[in-house]
């Protein structure tokens, strides 16, 4: 819990979920209005947070040790965008701070978001289902289908996306995912939201919440998107980009469809082991005492 960075006015109204979730708010020093707006929103939920001063792209010069320009060109096919690099390194810094703490989970937030009213209750429900995810995404800027797999609350479910989803405005991670972000994702070779959408390559499990509780379109004046066309190469884009993207899409579909199918059929090794043990115990009980016995009746 990062209480030390939370305004004093928030302290008496802390929500219990703050005891288990470290919340990190990424915010540029030159964007105080965004910070003030987010501070009021988080205070309304009773969520303690720690502000992480965003790496300002305006101050970045290349080459940079945290950025692999050659790999970025081969995979993404664009000129380096210093604001994109700053965003990437800011998310990595959040993961590092979380790993340096004793926290169990981290909520990473950018500063241009809107929240639904049930956010704290949703976070509590997500922690009860923590065995199913390493990364739980609460926002996206895409509209691809989310395949529901497990209820979280009366109105929201865990879901799996089979296609690429951009945007990294709000997400929950555990310590395994934080280690991956602070380690395997360096140096930067893709924009952050594309890089952490490839979690399956390193054996991590990502889920979405559906419907999404966080909107990443609260502020249309994105400092990363402004002037984005200046970084595109057009017909001069390297030939390697399309094969890389196609291979990533295939790997994503295969990995996530496998998880989705296992979830639907309940045939994962872990669930099969638990089921076998449970059924073994059930065989020793009278029918009227067995868990869910009534549900098995026709």
Image (cartoon, grey):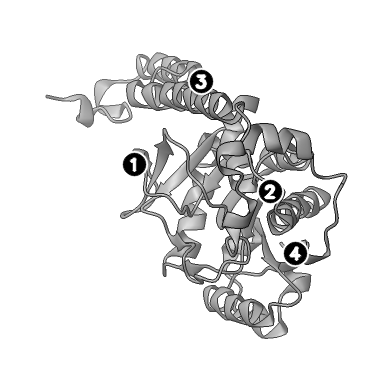
| Front residue of this view, candidates 216 and 234 | 234
Image location of residue 219, percent across then percent down:
51, 72
Q: Say which residue appears at 69% left-offset and 81% top-offset.
A: 32
* Horizontal arrangement in the rendering, residue 279 relative to residue 189 (left or right): left
Residue 270: mark: 3
Neighbour class for label 3 at 10 Å: few (<14), some, many (≥20)? few
Label 1 sits on a secondary structure element that is: loop
> Which label sits on residue 214?
none
Inter-mark Cα distance, 4 to 1: 31 Å
Q: Between tags 1 and 3, which lies in front? A: 1
Residue behind mark 4:
54
Residue 183, given in percent of the width and then of the height, sits at 79, 37
Q: Secondary structure at mark 3?
A: helix
Which residue is tagged 1?
145
Q: Earlier in the sequence, mark 4 or mark 1?
A: 4
Q: Marks 2 and 3, Cα distance to the nearest angstrom?
A: 22 Å
Question: Going by the image, does 116 lie left or right of 298?
Answer: right
Q: Earlier in the sequence, mark 4 or mark 3?
A: 4
Q: Label 4's element?
A: loop
Which mark is in front, 1 or 2?
Answer: 1
As measured in the structure, the alpha-carbon distance from the residue carrying label 2 to the one carrying label 4 is 23 Å
Counting from the top left corner in percent of width and height, residue 152 is at 40, 48
Q: Residues within 10 Å of mark 1 (few under 14, many from 20)?
A: few
Residue at point 73%, 67% (across, down): 50
What residue is shown with label 2? 104
Question: Is label 2 or label 4 in front?
Answer: 4
Mark in the foreground, 4 or 3: 4
3D distance between C-alphas at marks 1 and 2: 30 Å
How crowded is the residue under tag 4: few (<14 C-alpha within 10 Å), some, or many (20+)? many
- How far apart marks 4 and 3 lie (CA) works out to 40 Å
């Amino acid at each position: 819990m990062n209480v030390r960075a939370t305004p004093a006015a928030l302290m008496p109204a802390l929500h219990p979920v703050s005891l288990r979730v470290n919340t990190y708010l990424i915010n540029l020093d030159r964007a105080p209005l965004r910070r003030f707006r987010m501070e009021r929103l988080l205070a309304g939920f009773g969520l303690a947070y720690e502000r992480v001063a965003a790496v300002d792209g305006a101050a970045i010069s290349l080459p940079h040790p945290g950025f692999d320009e050659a790999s970025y060109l081969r995979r993404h096919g664009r000129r380096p965008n210093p604001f994109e690099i700053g965003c990437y390194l800011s998310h990595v810094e959040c993961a590092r701070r979380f790993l340096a703490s004793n926290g169990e989970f981290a909520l990473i937030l950018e500063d241009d978001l809107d929240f639904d009213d049930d956010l704290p209750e949703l976070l509590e429900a997500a922690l009860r289902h923590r065995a199913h995810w390493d990364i739980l995404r609460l926002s996206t800027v895409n509209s691809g289908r989310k395949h529901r797999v497990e209820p979280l609350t009366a109105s929201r479910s865990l879901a799996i996306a089979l296609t690429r989803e951009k945007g990294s405005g709000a997400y929950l991670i555990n310590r395994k995912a934080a280690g991956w972000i602070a380690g395997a994702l360096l140096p930067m070779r893709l924009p952050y939201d594309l890089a952490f959408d490839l979690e399956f390559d390193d054996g991590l499990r990502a889920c979405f919440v559906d419907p999404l509780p966080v909107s990443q379109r609260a502020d249309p004046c994105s400092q990363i998107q402004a002037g984005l066309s200046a970084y595109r190469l057009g017909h001069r884009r390297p030939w390697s980009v399309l094969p890389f993207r196609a291979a990533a899409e295939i790997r994503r579909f295969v990995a996530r469809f496998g998880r989705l199918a296992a979830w639907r059929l309940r045939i994962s090794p872990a669930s099969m082991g638990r089921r076998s043990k449970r059924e073994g115990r059930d065989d020793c009980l009278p029918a009227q005492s067995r868990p869910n016995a009534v549900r098995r009746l026709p």
